[in-house]
Image (cartoon, grey):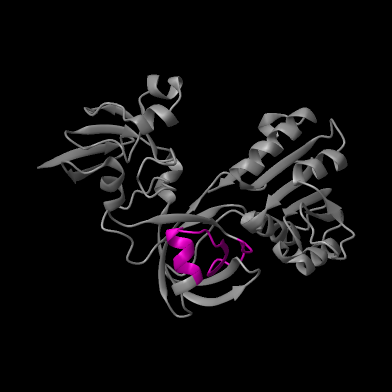
Amino acid sequence: MKVRIKVNEVREIDAESGRSLLAALREERIFLLSACGGRGGCGTCRAKVLEGATSPLTPSERHWLSEADKAAGVRLACQVKVERDLRIEIPEETFGIRHYETRVASLRDLTYDIKEVRLELTNPPEMEFRAGQFAQFRVPGSSADGPVYRSYSMASNPLSRGELTFQVRYVSKGICATYVHQRMKVGDNLTIVGPWGSVYLRDSDRDILFIAGGSGMSPVRSMLLDMVNRKCPRRTRCFFGAKSARDLYRVEEMKEFERKLPDFTFIPALSEPEPGAEWAGETGLITEVVDRRLPPGRPLDAYLCGSAMMVNACLKVLKAKGIADDRVFFDKFV
């Protein structure tokens, strides 16, 4: 049986009864962010259901949604079954998200567990995005439950719209990371969806603070390339946390940014430097290094990119330093 879904009062689509709202929208090329692939594990595929929802809140929704969300009719689209006509509201920017067909142009190991993936866009041939945003890879083959999507930040210059660079970290049992590191080959076709994300460089006169770990260097690199494009004069400090020297990468490129930007400093830190290794840089957890090096009360815009654990710890440090919440922008990598 077919039902009708009215989206933002401007578009109507037909969907098969019994499908999830997320799948119904995706079939009509309306893409809500879903980092977990639609299993209720990330809490990101949010839509406001104004009329027609019949299925009760699931345990996943009760976990991810605040009381204010629930009162406003916010649901996780992957958890809502389309059983009758619906009227929903989604963010306007969602209508700008689309599929892009790409070809794998090159693959390169940056570290033992981070691989650079360079994609050439084929249809359409260009993507406009803001430095700091991300796209989702559609894993070839995926699973019996449907296509699996995983999110990766662009590490590209936003002026290079026909070619995108990503830095993919290997995650044990990660569906997409395993594909990229073990099966992806130059010349393969790959579908991506994007661009997504609100972590992009804001225009202001404040200093800039970047804090990154692991593949969190991707959006930072993109923003630094954008700053070079715009000849940005703002005082910028970039802290990068790694476990040991073998986890560092793009160090020479960071030195090049120090030459190209008028007031940029790259500050790598090792939490567990190898015994006997020659390391003259900062040591300790990145939060400890930021706490030591960052003076309190300085007006700045902060951009955090890395694991949820790292981001949460850094948020506490910045709060203690007097950095306003509305000047802190972050992506938590999963």
Q: Does residue 76 appear anywhere in the picture?
A: yes
Residue that appears at 61% across and 52% down: 132
The mark tally for this picture is 0
Magenta stretch: residue 161 in it? yes
Residue 76 in the image, given as x and y percentages of width and height: 36, 35
Residue range corresponding to the magenta coloring: 155-181
Magenta stretch: residue 59 in it? no
Image vertical order of residue 231 relative to residue 211, above or below = below
- For the N terminus, the quadrant is top left
Residue 65 in the image, given as x and y percentages of width and height: 43, 28
Residue that appears at 72% across and 47% down: 211
Residue that appears at 81% across and 67% down: 256
Which residue is outermost to the right?
A: 280
Indicate left or right for 243 with 120 as reference: right
Residue 181 in the image, given as x and y percentages of width and height: 51, 70
Image vertical order of residue 240 relative to residue 321, above or below = below
